[in-house]
Image (cartoon, coloured by chain):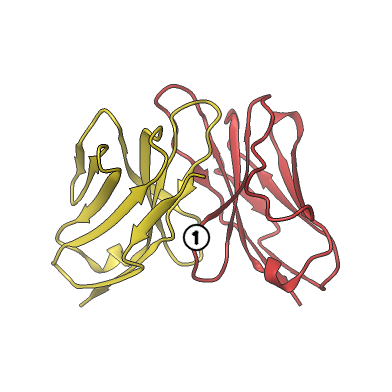
Chain colours: A yellow, B red
Amino acid sequence: GENVEQHPSTLSVQEGDSAVIKCTYSDSASNYFPWYKQELGKGPQLIIDIRSNVGEKKDQRIAVTLNKTAKHFSLHITETQPEDSAVYFCAASRRSSASKIIFGSGTRLSIRP
Amino acid sequence: GAGVSQSPSNKVTEKGKDVELRCDPISGHTALYWYRQSLGQGLEFLIYFQGNSAPDKSGLPSDRFSAERTGGSVSTLTIQRTQQEDSAVYLCASSFRTGMNTEAFFGQGTRLTVV
């Protein structure tokens, strides 16, 4: 079945440094790749997404890259700040009307002051 | 103008009892998802409803779990004969699944504790 693997499970970076989280997916028909941020006690919230017709997308300090051939996608956060501390989930789905969203196992990101 | 609403926010139940968890999706959203998140773990897919199509139940862990979506809106996740391993946060999400617009909006979750 469909599977999304995510690494690392925990990540600690110095404030101001960059953080990178990587994911791989198994379903070659996947064409929509969202990233969610979950703060303590809250539901996950979409922060950025990328579709298979695009290789890279950037929104201020956040960027995502997608390599469809290798079935890899990554989240890059630059100039990290304390409020970036959270759990981040990658996900994959087919952009059709009958497709579930499969999530990775999550990365707990901690920003050291 | 609410987002996805889940109730109750917390539920403590005795082992062997049945529980019902409710999800009110965003008005007009045709897709509704249930996920389970055990402590410190990822989001485990349970079930997916899309419009009038048959639901994708492939993630339900056992026949003690079932879900309904009445009138294409409110959904109820039912767990029968609860076990301690059912303790987790149950998250509901909805999306307006058409064309390019596929963002899923999550509720705050229901924290279920089976004692």
Q: Amino acid at mark 1?
A: Lys
For label 1, the crowd category at 10 Å Cα-Cα, with few meaning under 14, some 14 to 19 and many 20 or more, is few
A96 displayed left or right of B55 = left
Relative image position of residue B67 (x, y in whole percent)? 74, 44
Q: Residue at x 48, y 61 (%)?
A: B42
Relative image position of residue B49 (x, y in whole percent)? 64, 35
Relative image position of residue A11 (x, y in whole percent)? 28, 70
B94 displayed left or right of A67 = right
- Observer-nearest of A1 and A10: A1
**Image vertical order of residue B18 relative to residue A47, above or below:** below
**Image vertical order of residue A68 relative to residue B28, above or below:** below
Give the mark count.
1
Q: Residue at x 50, y 60 (%)?
A: A42
Which chain is home to disc 1?
Answer: A
Relative image position of residue A13 (x, y in whole percent)? 21, 72
Q: Quadrant of the N terminus of chain B?
A: top right
Quarter of image, res B69 = top right
Q: Secondary structure at mark 1?
A: loop
Q: Residue at x 76, y 77 (%)?
A: B115
Quarter of image, res B47 = top right
Quarter of image, res B33 = top right
| Residue furthest to the top | B99
A22 displayed left or right of B42 = left
Q: Residue at x 82, y 58 (%)?
A: B80
Q: Which residue is mark 1?
A: A42
